[in-house]
Image: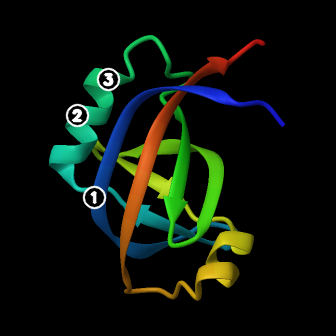
Amino acid sequence: MATYALLVEFEFSAAVIEWRGPAPFYYADIPVEDSDDVKDAAKGLEYWGQVPVTAVIGDTEFTTALFPKDGRYLLPLKDVVRRAEGIELGMTLEVGMDLRRAPRTG
């Protein structure tokens, strides 16, 4: 497993929302102010509008990519993370998050 160089650390509270597509997907809805800060810090890191991150909720650390929606970012909540932390729709989560650059060598 690679160790990543941390660029910026963010901490915020976010509501768990559901976005239905072919199947329901769950996200932490990052507040607008924090999304603006992430957007500024992520210049050059984004790909197709997504931003690679390492996030921590409770005791669970995971990697993913933020999803842009309506001028803010959504943090995807993988099923394994939701199960481990007992996350349900409508909850408010405390999230720690770092932007990922590239694997550290050595």
Crowdedness of circle 1 by 10 Å Cα count: few (<14), some, many (20+)? few
Direction right: furthest residue? 1
Residue type beneath disc 1: Phe
17 w.r.t. 38: above or below: below
Secondary structure at numbered mark 1? strand
Which residue corresponds to mark 1? 12
Q: Nearer the viewer, residue 24 or 27?
A: 27
In three-dimensional space, the C-alpha distance between marks 2 and 3, rounded to whole angstroms, equals: 6 Å
Give the total number of marks visible in the rendering.
3
Q: Are marks 2 and 3 in contact (CB under 8 Å)?
A: yes
Where's residue 84, x and y in %? Answer: 68, 80
Which residue corresponds to mark 2? 37
Q: Are marks 1 and 2 in contact (CB under 8 Å)?
A: no
Mark 1 or mark 2, which is nearer to you?
Answer: 1
Secondary structure at numbered mark 3? helix
Residue type beneath disc 3: Ala
Which residue corresponds to mark 3? 41
